[in-house]
Image: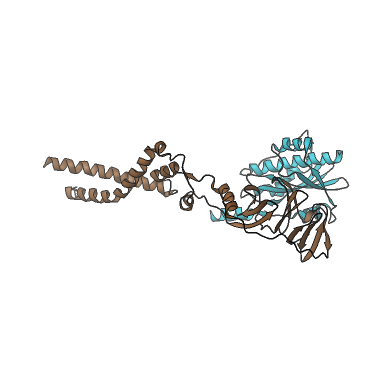
Chain colours: A cyan, B brown
Amino acid sequence: MVILLASSLHARGVYQTDKDFLDEVFDNAPPKSKKIMLVGKLRKSVEKILEHPYGSLRIRYWKKDEKTAWILEEIGKVEPITFGIEIKDNQIQDIKVLEFREIRGWEVRYPAFRKQFEGASLDGMKLNREVDGISGATLSVWAMTSIAELSLFLDQYVKNK
Amino acid sequence: MKKIRITLKAINQVHKFTGIAVCVFLIHLSITGIFLNHTEELGLDEKYTASPLILGLYNISIPNKEESFSVDNHFISRFGNQVFLDNQPVFKSENPIIGAVIFNQMLVLAFQKELVLLTEEGELIEKLTTATGLPENIQKLGGSDRLLLLRASNQSWESEDEGQEWRGTDSNFNEWSNEVVMPNEKIQQVESYFLGKGVSLEQFFLDLHNGNIIKGFGKWLLDIIAIFLLLISISGIWIWLRKKRY
């Protein structure tokens, strides 16, 4: 029991800072951030993807050449999980857990699981592939899938703007 | 094989000691039972208690008030890891609030590593971090008509665009946001968020009656009392029958 509790507590925390994530995505030269206000039709589309409103009114992103990076949050069970997403050519290059605050479901941070998202793109408003779940981490898997869909949708939105 | 004889004296002893053991609980069960029988007449289902002792039995507690700031007509406070705008929970933070100001009709809250922008209604606009160019290690936050000001890493910084871009400044600005004492009335309003109405007296008497008030063990304690009551009844009948025979 003590070992289980200790491992759960250990799983909570910052795995990578926002700054380190952006340095990694943009080879230590991240561009200036840009922002999107979630208003009107865009807000409704975001709400449709997540099945609830996004946690803030403004979303920030970083764009250089054809690559965009997003730092987004989504609730796992009760606490928000911070994800970092790298997108190029309308496909996810990488999705990472930057900060995990829940006591369960942290397994989504493992590269073996995240690999399923590499190369994923949108088919309508959904991912073009099925993502295998993890027993005991269902809500975190759902959160990561929703955020993958949201980031791809926003990537298209800023490119078509 | 030796035959065990149950004597009247032994049964009398069992009867006497189980009687003493259960009498306190019988009084407890009787009193709580009477209250439960008259819940509606006594209005127990409409009365609530917020006694810390009773709430403690239900693991309901109020986290400590950590920091509080006054902005415009609002109070920004943190109880445990919950940040409040007046008595409305707005978001969670395990880090202390360093300052809070109003700027361009937005509430700006500073933490060591981030600035949080809220609407005046408490809706989250955005969290700014070092990834968005925020200076590291924030120590103080201030605001003037057109500038947001920070003291971070022992240097002063200013921003004209809601914290999107920061530049170092030699300004001798000293009207930094400071903690204030929160009036008791305001504290109580926040505390009511954690307590709700409290615990209804009906629920309290019910849990006293069925032993659930003592988590885990209470149920078993009541089972033991029930066995004692069976024992006292059986021994009582036995004694009565034996006495009748003589």
On the image, the x and y values in percent for residue A103 come to 61, 50
Front residue (pair A83, B76): B76
The residue lying furthest to the top in this view is: A124
Q: For residue A157, what is the image quadrant? A: top right
Q: Is residue B193 left or right of residue A125?
A: left
| Quadrant of the snapshot with the C terminus of chain A | top right
Does any portion of residue B199 appear in the rendered image?
Answer: yes
> With B205 as the anchor, is A97 left or right in this view?
right
Which residue is depicted at the point 17% across and 40% down?
A: B241
Residue B147: x percent and y percent?
81, 56
Q: Position of residue B218 (x, y in %)?
A: 40, 48
Q: Residue at x 18, y 42 (%)?
A: B240
Residue located at (73% from left, 45% from top): A56
Q: Is residue A90 visible?
A: no
Q: Is residue A89 left or right of residue B207?
A: right
The percent coordinates of residue A20 (x first, y second) are: 77, 56
Residue at the left extreme?
B246
In-front residue for pair A59/A131 = A59
Task: Name above or below for residue B209 compared with residue B128.
Answer: above
